[in-house]
Amino acid sequence: MKLLFVASLWLILCGVSNVFADDKSHLEAVEEFLSVVNMESAMTQTIQRMLTVKIRQNPKLAPFRKTMQEFLIKHVGWESMKGEIIQMWKNAFTEQEVRELTEFYKTPTGQKAIKAMPALIARASQIGQQRVRENLPELKRMIEEEAKERGIDLND
């Protein structure tokens, strides 16, 4: 009986260590993927683009660009978010899927996609903003009609 207990305990412990080994392997796969897609650089570039847009919208912020940049890097930069981003990708994709994504992004087409994606996303955002601006009178009319139906005075 004691031998059966020891054998069972051994099997359980081996199973638990395999779970940790699998988890470690999965995390390593995600880290490799994030490295291949240059996530750190992408996040830094996003912060820079965001600052440029905000300063363009409000030029009075220009003298504070460095301070705002330090703040953003501290709170939403790669080093501060790395652990959560790794966990997010680990939860979203199996280890095998992460490895498949990594292999794709190592190809010339994958690398081209990485380089093209920021500009494509920025352009899509510009198109969306332009369409909203072009159609603001419609939104204004819709809000006014709904306010009237609900008895809300928009002049308050």
Image (cartoon, rainbow, N blue to C red):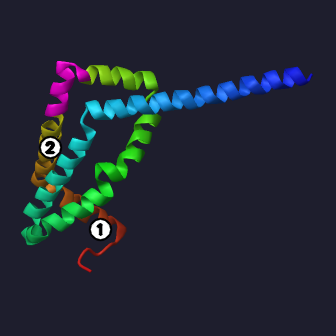
Mark identifier at residue 122: 2
The span from disc 1 to disc 2 (Cα, nearest Å) is 37 Å
- For residue 62, what is the image quadrant? bottom left
- State which tag comes first along the sequence, 1 or 2: 2
- Circle 1 SS class: helix
Q: Amino acid at mark 1?
A: Lys
Instruction: Choose between 72 and 121: the one closer to the eye.
Output: 72
Residue that carries the numbered disc 1 in the rendered image: 148
The quarter of the image holding the N terminus is top right
Left or right for 67, reference 18 = left
Asked whether the viewer can see residue 137, the reply is no
Instruction: Choose between 139 and 27: the one closer to the eye.
Output: 27
Left or right for 18, reference 91 = right
Q: Position of residue 136 (x, y in %)?
A: 15, 57
Mark 1 or 2, closer to the camera: 2
- Circle 2 SS class: helix
